[in-house]
Structures are given as C-alpha cells and as structure tokens.
Image (cartoon, grey):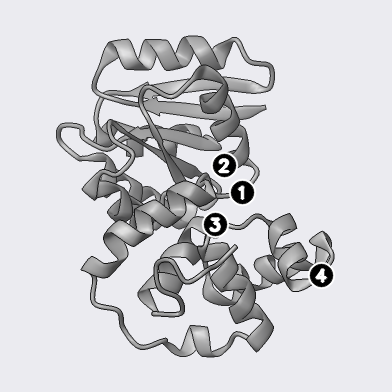
C-alpha cells in the first residue's frame, strides 16, 4: 500500500486529489495539510511514502517544506512530488534542487496523477525526457556552475556516461540501448552512482549533472 499525504492550501484541490487516489487500489491517502508547516508535521507523524506538495502555501511554502522533509534523516523514505500551476515555473528547478522527486501540473489527468504516485513511490524520478530537457535548458544557465567536487571525481568513466544520460532524461532501457548494455546493468550503474553521490533519486542526479557542468542543454543528439 502506498501511503500518501496531500499538502495544498485549497480544500477543493485536496478533495479532488483525494477522490482520485482513494479510488485506486494500492494507494491510501493517510493525511492532509493546508500549509508547509502542517505538511512537515504530517510527514513526521505519518511517515508516508509520498507527499503531494503544493509549491505556494502560507506559513511555510512547498519549497522550504520539501527541503525540511528531504534533509530529515527520520524521513529518509518519504518522497515529494511538487504541484505547480505551470510546468515551467521558476520555482520548479529550485524544488528539484531542494530534493523533490519530480513535479506535476495541477490540471494533470487522473491517470497521470496515479502514475506519478506509483513511479515516485518505487524510487524513480518523475521527470519525462521532454520536460527534463525543456526545464533544465530554461533554468540551468541561470546558476553558476561549480567545478566538479570530490564526489563526482569518484565516478568511473562509464558512470559519468550513464549519469549524463540520466540527466538527459533517458530511462534505464534507453541508456542500455545507447551504451549497448543490458537494462539490468544500466540499472546497477544508476544505483551505484546514486550511492556514491548520496542522491535520493534520479531527479537529484539531473541537478548535480547540470550544476557540475557535466553536460549542457541540447548536447544529446537522437
């Protein structure tokens, strides 16, 4: 059972999401929050698998609430999906940097919402390739890219290749095809990279790759 908390300051939005998720087998809405502070409190109290987090809320916004949740060692298994009105919102890149596992627009289709919860609950990042390229191309250039740190230096050449492809939004199967590996081997590489870099999920690898200057927007050709 995937335990979910809904955090949004609009009652109608929470009611709509609750109705969709509660009707789905294997998903349970265990709590709701009307602001970021409540979202953090509910996460600590209920230990859900996934928090659906509105990015703009009173008292504590979704960005800061996400940062608090993902840096709390007691909440290591809690994943956050950011909810935003626009899929190219200035806050979205910051949300990924804060530790969110992905994002959804609020007018998403019910099937997409259900899929998102399942994807993030199993530890994958909710960033489609097209969205990844568009989002990072838009915002990655706004930050000052530091030199690769010691953690990135610990990666092998193959792991750097894999990480760059993850950052481009490729799935494990697509990475395997491009590098002529088995899907299982590609998955193992991704897991090892996340362990070496201390990343919660693939979303964090995307951010790290661009911030370290490993790749630049548009580098990957079909």
Q: Nearer the viewer, mark 4 or mark 2?
A: 4
**Residue annotated with mark 1:** 123
Q: Hey, which residue is sitting farthest front in the picture?
A: 222
Choose between 112 and 59: the one closer to the eye: 112
Task: Examine the rendered structure and indicate whether residue 57 appears above or below residue 206.
Answer: above
C-alpha span from label 3 to label 4: 17 Å
- Tell me the mark number nearer the camera, choosing from 4 and 1: 4
Q: CA distance from mark 1 to mark 3?
A: 15 Å
x and y percentages locating residue 51 in the rendered image: 44, 35
How many numbered markers are drawn? 4
In the image, is residue 166 above or below residue 36?
A: below
Q: Earlier in the sequence, mark 4 or mark 2?
A: 2
Give the residue at mark 2: 120
Quote the CA–CA distance across marks 4 and 1.
22 Å
Tag 4 residue:
181
- How much space separates mark 1 and mark 2, taking CA atoms? 5 Å
């Amino acid at each position: 059972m995937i335990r979910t908390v809904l955090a949004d300051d609009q009652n109608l939005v929470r009611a709509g999401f609750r109705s969709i998720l509660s009707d789905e087998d294997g998903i349970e809405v265990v709590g709701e929050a009307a602001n970021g502070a409540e979202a953090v409190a509910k996460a600590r109290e209920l230990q859900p698998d996934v928090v659906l987090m509105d990015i703009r809320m009173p008292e504590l916004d979704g960005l800061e609430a996400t940062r608090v949740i993902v840096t709390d060692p007691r909440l290591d298994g809690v994943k956050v999906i950011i909810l935003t009105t626009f899929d190219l919102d200035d806050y979205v890149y910051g949300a990924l940097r804060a530790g969110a596992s992905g994002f959804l627009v609020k007018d998403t289709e019910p099937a997409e919402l259900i899929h998102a919860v399942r994807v993030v609950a199993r530890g994958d990042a909710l960033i489609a390739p097209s969205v990844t390229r568009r989002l990072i191309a838009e915002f990655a250039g706004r930050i000052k890219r530091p030199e690769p740190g010691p953690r990135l230096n610990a990666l092998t050449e193959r792991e750097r290749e894999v990480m760059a492809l993850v950052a481009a939004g490729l799935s494990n199967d697509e990475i395997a095809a491009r590098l002529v590996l088995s899907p299982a081997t590609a998955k193992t590489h991704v897991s090892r990279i996340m362990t070496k870099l201390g990343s919660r999920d693939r979303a964090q690898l995307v951010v790290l790759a661009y911030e370290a200057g490993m790749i630049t927007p548009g580098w990957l050709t079909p």
